[in-house]
Amino acid sequence: MRRLVPAPNLALATLWADMLTHAGIEATVQRAYASSIAGELPPDQALPEVWVSDDEQLESARVLLAQLRRPTWRHWRCPGCAETIDGPFEQCWNCGAAMPPA
């Protein structure tokens, strides 16, 4: 079991661990409630952390987490209403049509 990354808060730590687990990399959140002792410990030592259970998946988890934290920015034209969609969205904001396959 290896530490992947500290998270700024419990919500992000849980989200990242869930996304990694969904991708097939077993991940857990450690120090989930350590923020309650911040002050007795330095604040950076009380942050929640995401840990990967299998040491061999650590590098894959780092790559995947980097991709999840910085989704690709793209532009596409909606096949339903011809609206231009910006950003990491996969559905048209105007008519609800799905992004066409690449």
Image (spheres, helix red, strand yellow):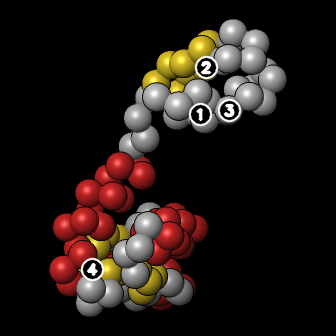
Q: Nearer the viewer, mark 4 or mark 1?
A: 1
The residue to which callout 4 is attached is 3
- Label 4 and label 3: CA atoms lie apart by 37 Å
Choose top left, top right, bottom left or bottom right for residue 96: top right
Which x, y percent locates residue 31? 43, 86
- Mark 1 secondary-structure assignment: loop
Looking at the picture, which amino acid does disc 4 mark? Answer: Arg
- Label 3 and label 2: CA atoms lie apart by 11 Å
Q: Nearer the viewer, mark 3 or mark 1?
A: 3
Q: Is residue 66 above or below residue 75?
A: below
Q: Verify CB contact (< 8 Å) between mark 1 and mark 2.
A: yes
User: Disc 4 or 3, which lies upstream in sequence?
Assistant: 4
- Mark 3 secondary-structure assignment: loop
Q: Nearer the viewer, mark 3 or mark 2?
A: 3
The residue to which callout 3 is attached is 98
The residue to which callout 1 is attached is 89
- Label 4 and label 1: CA atoms lie apart by 31 Å
